[in-house]
Image (tube, rainbow, N blue to C red):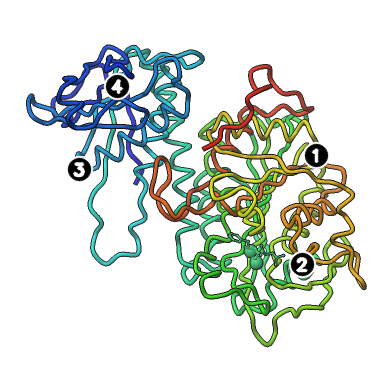
Amino acid sequence: MAVALRWTATRSDETPLVVHFVVEGMEPAGGSMAPDPVSAKRRGFSAKPGETMVDDANGSAASLYVGLGERAKVTGEVLRRAGSAIARSAKRYVGVHVPLGGLEFPGIALDLAAELLGIGIELANYQLDTFRSEPTPPVLEFAEFSDGDAAEVTRALDRAMAVGEAVEMARDLVNTPAGDLAPADFADIAKSTAEAAGLGIEIYDEARIAAERMGGLLGVAAGSVKPPRFITMTYEPESHSEEVPTVALVGKGITFDSGGLSLKTGTGMMTMKMDMSGAAAVLATLSVCARLGVAVRVVGYMPLTENMPSGSATKPGDVLRTRSGKTIEVLNTDAEGRLILADALTVASESKPDSIIDLATLTGACVIALGSQIAGLLGNDDVLIRQVQAAGRRAGEALWPLPLPTGYHSHIDSEIADMKNIGATGQAGTISAALLLEEFVGDVPWVHLDIAGPAWSEQDQGLVRKGATGFGVRTLLSLLEHYEPRGGVREEDADGITVLP
Ligand code: BES
Ligand code: ZN
Ligand code: ZN
């Protein structure tokens, strides 16, 4: 359950906890109170970003001191983390009061500060409680914000709730065990989401997928008893003139990746229910486009299947014919993401959108290169690459570019087919995967995000909880809200393009 975020003129007496923002030097950041320096020191609170201290010694409500660090260095990410620190410290309370007075920093107006704090609160407060027999302890229910313009702050908080709920939806989908979320289950959820959010939806079953000649998706699905699905979902903005640009979103939807006959190890497949994080991010993003008033047309493509070994599974050495007509020799059945994305990218490019963005937990190589908190970003169009990077920076998700050199194309040359599904042993695995994807986008500007690292977290820290992170949702929403059809990167986005953890 998301935290209700609302504006209030005055603190209601029932709110049991009040926040006081503090900057380094133990000064109040706004109109709020600073703690007693002696007791703060004794308790190890020095107002560094993310530090908190609760004081419930006196008064009707307890005080929650939240550090912001040096005033001159307060960024959007510092405020998001402050929000997450509030949610983490306020767990035992039903509600928290957040005075915004004075929370203005270079480039951050009061309403943006509210939104950033709100997102931090929403994301850190997340928990999945469907799979426990005992109810989990209650978390924070509401946060009320005071000061600033009521209408502006309310709009900012509504935005934070919409984005927060989308991230929560992606996390729920990814955290749900594969045994409870087969391709058909995912499609049922997509259908009810489309109905609730007023989106167009088309779901292909296995027969239709075959009729559509999606040999990549069928080849991966061949080993599973759970039939595949292919979902197309459409958001039409209010002004749906011909002029409105179209952005296609494609998400890898492997509901479980065992590796297929090229079986993973026990440890290697322990978290592989998360291999549909790309599709989850696409569905979750679409679910709030209307609420956020996104002004571009968005079409989401989600190829969904399990990757399982069995007597009917695709074997190493088999050749698949994709929808595009291009053939792929499967030398390792564990490199299955690119096979289903090949078909999905072909379908996406057929309707000539202005841009295609795909998200996929595609390669272990990307986790080795960039670790668990940074996504790889590759593409065929520098302007779109920069736009997506800028969206990541605004949203607070770390993306780092990798090259897509044509000179490495020989890495995917096959002896018998148009290409093979693995690259050169031990070399540039993220790049060879992306080079294969590039074969299927035609001349449409395209960006690929390899989210194998940041889609899942082993740590409970800051804005992420253990497990699914919902990575990509915030970047996609920010991109859609600021999308520039024929390229162009706004002045304010031109530099400092990546936020790093
Ligand atoms: N789903 C995995 C990639 C992955 C690994 C995601 C770790 C998240 C964490 C993907 O399908 C895969 O197994 N890729 C192989 C490709 C290789 C066989 C060329 C890999 O990265 O090992
Ligand atoms: Zn795999
Ligand atoms: Zn996979």
Residue type highlighted by circle 1: Pro
> Residue 406, percent across and down?
88, 48
Determine the image quadrant of residue 398: top right
The answer to which of marks 4 and 1 sits earlier in the sequence is 4
How much space separates mark 3 and mark 4, taking CA atoms? 20 Å
Label 1: element kind = loop
Contact check, label 2 and label 4, Cβ < 8 Å: no
Name the residue that disc number 4 marks: 21
Q: Quadrant of residue 417?
A: bottom right
What is the distance, in whole Å, between disc 4 and disc 1 at their CAs? 44 Å
Q: Mark 2 points at which residue?
A: 216
Of the residues tagged 2 and 4, which is closer to the observer?
4
Q: Are marks 2 and 3 in contact (CB under 8 Å)?
A: no
- Measured in 3D between alpha carbons, the distance from the residue under mark 2 to the one under mark 3, in whole angstroms, is 50 Å
Q: Can residue 194 be seen in this view?
A: no
Q: Name the residue under label 1.
A: 445
Q: Which of marks 2 and 3 is in front?
A: 3
Which sits earlier in the primary sequence, circle 2 or circle 3? 3
The image shows residue 482, relative to residue 1, as above or below, that is above
Q: Of 407 and 161, which appears nearest the observer?
A: 407
The residue to which callout 3 is attached is 92
